[in-house]
Image (cartoon, coloured by chain):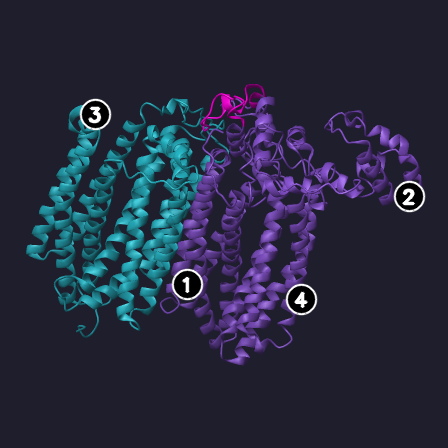
Chain colours: A cyan, B purple
Amino acid sequence: MIAPNLIPAPDPNPLPAPYWVLETLLLVTFFLHILAMNFMLGGAVMALVAKWGPAKRKNGNRMFSDIARKLPVLLPAVITVGIAPLLFVQVLYGQFFYTSSIIMAWPWLFVLVLLAAAYYGFYFVSYKKERYPDRAGLVLLLSVVSIFIIAFLFSNNITLTQTPARWGAKYFADPGGWNLNLSEPTLIPRYLHFMTAAVALGGILLVLLAWARWKQDREYARDVFHLGGKTFMYATMAEFLVGIWFLVALPRQMTYLFLGGDPLATILLGIAVAGAIGAIVVMARALRSENIRLAAYSVMGIMSVVIFSMVGIREILFHAYLKPYFHPEQFAVKTQWSVFPLFLVLFVAGVILWFVMLKRYGLFARRKLPDQPQP
Amino acid sequence: MNYPVWDVAFGAGLLIATVAIIHVFVSHFAVGGGLFLVVTERKARRNGDTKLLDWLKFHSKFFVLVTVVFGVVTGVGIWFTIGLINPTATSDLIHIYVWGWAIEWVFFFTEISAALFYLYGWDKLDARVHQWFGWIYFIAAFASLVVINGIITFMLTSGSWVKNHQFWSGFFNPTYFPSLALRFAICLALAGVYALITASVQKDKALKARIVRWSALWIVPSLAMMPAFGWWYIHQIPSHVWASARGPMPTATDFAHYAVILLVVAFALALISLIKPARMHLAFSLLIALVALGTMGSFEFVRESVRLPYVIDNYLYANSIYASPVPGDGGFNLEKIKQAGVLKTAKWVKTRELTPENQVAVGREVFRVDCESCHTTDEYRGVKELLTLRQWDQAKTQTMLGVLYLMHNNVMPPFAGNNAEQAALAAFLYSLEPTRAREAGPPDGHTVFVHNCAMCHEPRKNDYLFKYLPKDPATAIKALEHLPNLFPLMPDLKLSAAERTALVQWVNTRRGIAAHAAGQGGN
């Protein structure tokens, strides 16, 4: 017989700050992580599209190089920013997250192997793309496939985290940790929802790249802009289909949350949908009028709001799944006043220092126009 | 018990150790190597040594590929692994030190950013700004060590935290400063060790010799300081805890020996590299790195082993059971589990009722939740091998399970469960079919000692058995008839007269008492 309640009790140490503080930190840092992840994965996909895409581009190889050079910086950004939500999710939802991770322990650990492989792949491409152009494409493809698998494993783990009713059967069938959550009906649409978003944001990364090259080399930048802008539009359109699939795959009471059942969920979904449609319209106009600033500023601005709304939606859904099992009031809270302010001070100092570093590195400096336009 | 136990066939402990040792070998390089980069850059620029500067560019690329890629991924790997293998301890450490981890994350983010700016800034930034990035990197990396060190040492010596539960009491615990000093010395030594690797592939012999000499300047003094820091460290650990590494506990003792031997070897190799620095070969540099890895790995093994039976000193046992009742512990404390039993307490067991038919199956489950954090059946710290060594039958195994906490300098927690579960565990262990030795002739004393005493006693002068067992053989043989009379906590092993006689004879021989006396006593 399997125990009726397998959910581990939270540990006896109180939360060192109120629940809402930690939840806010979780959401904000997760937003930054997912933003970086989208740019990294979407960017890598776009590099492959530029190199091997259906329409052979004159600037394909140059675009490939241009993006590939950024990937070894984007991936550590994803990881370093990702460590914070990994910390806060353990603080608040460890009892669920650890358990699902243990049930699928080996695939979960395999994430690290794939991550290291993808990471070294990115460096190989960045450093050796001129010397081995063909091999660089293949290596990048392998890195991208690795990251797609990582994302799939994450989707497995998170869907398992929020469905404790499945845990017992899976664990006792194989305590050795060789499980996934493939029978979860929302797994595939959820996964595709994230991956399609990454491709859309990859399009925006190209728009930003085009913007940076706009004055130096208009023809190249225009090409990049069009590829990025169109990719963004088509991927976002596809996202609607995937999103609808995801919505209907949810248990009915959860679908209902987003259709008026929960005001906040409905509003956030409304913002996300309206924002995405607005972003497509703005991008279309920007492409027609070749207004790169409009595309870069407005679409990026709108999409930031859309993504933040989606992060909120994701959290509401997570709580809806865990409603029978998780109650924030279960936590004892004892704010660690002797150290929490120190974190805040260091965090602010860290952010300031980071901007100083960007400035000293020259990222905010206006680029000089070259004397001769590049071919 | 609160969380499911991940059944790792080859040993969960070994998996954690592997990931952790690989990570620390890189992460300490990340700290020391940062200082190495910026100090070497300053030296090269001051001397106008462009060749050294060119090598440094190459070395900084290697540095980033090792630390920012491999170091970061294995760092995340530690998080993943400890969460999978010891979720209770991880959750405790996360809750106690959230703001410590969060502060460390700020430093970490700064560190990684600065490392990338430093790498990509070689041809872009002026010398002063480039070195500024190098210093930012090093300071952030060192600061992250300062934070992590507090949490790691807390696990070994929790200090007054157990009483007052104050963040800083646990953080600045007794081993904090010696550990910081020792680890920083390791960081500096590793900076030189890794530099030898990239130096060894340089074609310019004069340049290679310069780098090797410069690297040795980082390695040799740092290694030379380590015994002093180690001594300081050890003296901050309670002596009864450190005693594990002085014989009674095989893992701690063996690795303490390896650490000392490999440290000496690393020191000697570093000196040898100075004999003909221009001829430093890649293989030789990798050998030094391997020895350094062995030294560091051994040190970490010792630290983790002497900490046992705890994973958090005086608070949480290695098998995720709270040593004493703590408000909010969900009943996962030793006292409660002994009372209620594993089957009624653990969340992640299949069987809730123990019957004569399911005894072995229940024993298997008890083994998983009570023992698998450190033991396997056949692999790492395999119990089958241990049972073969001791030759215990089921009854003796059951008796011995009652005194686990006395064995090997108290490195195991007391058995957590009720008497019936203890019997079930014994039945399961016996079902593993440890190899039985053939009884051939009368027992010899050493074998009797190994089978019955060696888990708690060692053949040395100040061991209780060797010090206090009556010297007169007849009295000693009589005394061994009922062991709890000798010391109330001892298991009531029923040794036969022949076994007792052999044991006394062997003990007396070891402590230099005339053999004929023992012989007479046996008559």
Q: Residue B415: where, in percent of width, then height? A: 61, 29
- Residue A366: in sight, yes or no? no
Host chain of mark 1: B
Which residue type does callout 1 highlight? Answer: Val
Asked if both marks, 3 and 1, belong to the same chain, the answer given is no
Q: Residue A104: where, in percent of width, then height? A: 38, 40
Which residue type does callout 3 highlight? Answer: Gln
| Circle 2 Cα neighbour tier, 10 Å, few/some/many (<14 / 14–19 / ≥20) | some
Which quadrant of the figure has residue B171? top right
Q: Secondary structure at mark 1?
A: helix
**Rounded to the nearest whole Å, what is the CA distance between mark 3 and mark 4?**
70 Å
Name which residue lies at 65% across and 69% down. B271
Q: Nearer the viewer, residue A45 or A214?
A: A45
* Front: mark 1 or 2: 2
| Circle 3 Cα neighbour tier, 10 Å, few/some/many (<14 / 14–19 / ≥20) | few
* Front: mark 3 or 4: 3
Earlier in the chain: of badge 1 and badge 4, it is: 1
| Circle 1 Cα neighbour tier, 10 Å, few/some/many (<14 / 14–19 / ≥20) | some
Magenta span: B336-359
**Rounded to the nearest whole Å, what is the CA distance between mark 4 and mark 2?**
46 Å
Task: Give the farthest residue toward the left.
Answer: A288
Residue marked by disc 4: B268
Residue B129's disc number: 1
* Front: mark 3 or 1: 3
